[in-house]
Amino acid sequence: MSILMTLRIAFKALGRNKMRTALTMLGMIIGVAAVIAMVALGTGAQAAIEEQVRSTGTNRITIRSGSFDRGGARGGAGTSTRLVQADADLLRTLPEIEFVAEQASTRSQVIYGSANWNTNVQGTNVDMPAITSWRVQYGDFFGPDDVRGAAKVVVLGNNVAINLFGEGVDPTGEIIRLRNHVFRVIGVMAERGAGSGGQNQDDQVFVPYTTVLKKLSGQQSLNDIIVSAYSADRIDAAVATITTALGAAHGIPPGEDPDFFVQTLNDIIALRTAQTSTMTALLAGIAGVSLVVGGIGIMNIMLVSVTERTREIGLRMAIGARGNDVLLQFLIEAIVISLVGGAVGIACGYGVSEGVKYYNNWPSLVPPDAVVTAVGFSAAVGVFFGFYPARKAAGLDPIEALRFE
């Protein structure tokens, strides 16, 4: 018997009990839709994280102060005080580095008239906007003379400006207070949103790092140094050069852990996407249970179908149909149920992911390999769970089948 004829018989048999066939497909539809939706939302979240991190500057490298070890007492990351101005000056001499910005931070209540806001005060250098690809919305960023003179000038983050002055107001030239010092507002940064660590980048103010060291915090060391490589393909070379140069400057013997660590955007992306990948895999695995349940439903219905159609099977075999023909027919029926259910499930999964994207503003992205996998898995479920009922039908004795009531 030809494959085409077998398909026609399979579709006709499934069409006799449309409601039962539709309910059998429902398990596959729900399972595939859940897997597609979970993968789409997880993949979209990973893509959003990568874009969010890279928006802070593709070539950015951060050198952070590490831990200290003194008299047997060991401090955690960030407790070392050996990252200093001389290190930043050394980095400026390296051929792989384009921009360098020292970083020293503290917290303070920012006061303007009767309004006040507690925020992070980020001391930095003039290259920070170039390194982070961050533009100024109002006014200007401070210049080299402000850094050398530890000037009391401040550039506000967008969120701080709104809380102090209101929405859409240009506060350039206004006077605010940080602790006991009077600062002149010279600019406002453009809205940026959450950073790679989830913090609100707009909820901070920027002042010369020398001002933080000399007038606000009194600390002698830097919290970190951010630099920018000339191009993305030179980041690895820049990291190796930085590690070697600073290790030699700090007197770190070969093989020992340095008192600083170097972090690139790829490190941050790998950490964040690994977390979302794990969660996506977990959710997809849970959703995949529905596929197994759907497959069991297919096997159950096909067994019922074999019992109902025993006389039909006996008649077909009596007039010359072989066991393989009967096996192929029932196997095709199971595969058709799986594939049609899988196709509808893929469409539903797309719809769910787009609905969540539209109503909850959650990024979603359906990778092509997920669709191919869903279709392949649907067919595999049909073959796996349809084989036993098909084999049972093919093994019926024609005489006994014709006697069946």
Image: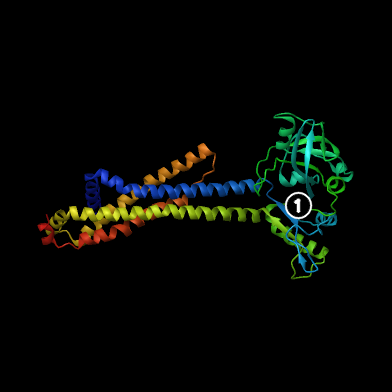
- The spot of residue 56 in percent (x, y) is 68, 46
Q: Residues within 10 Å of mark 1 (few under 14, many from 20)?
A: many
Residue 33 to residue 182: above or below: below
- Residue 208: quadrant of the picture: top right
In the rendered image, the vertical position of residue 209 relative to residue 261, given as above or below: above
Q: Residue 270: x, y in percent?
A: 61, 56
In the image, 115 versus 36, the foreground residue is 115
> Dot 1 lies on which element?
strand
Number of numbered markers: 1
Q: Is residue 38 left or right of residue 405?
A: right
View extreme (right): residue = 149
Quadrant in which the C terminus appears: bottom left
Instruction: Depth check: give the residue in front, 359 or 179.
Output: 179
Q: Callout 1, which amino acid?
A: Val
Return the x and y of residue 269 as percentages of the image width and height. Answer: 62, 53
Task: Answer yes or no: is residue 274 visible.
Answer: yes
* Residue at the front extreme, as displayed: 114
Percent across and percent down for residue 267 are 65, 56
The residue where tag 1 is placed is 227
Residue at the spot 76% in from the left edge and 70% down from the top edge:
254
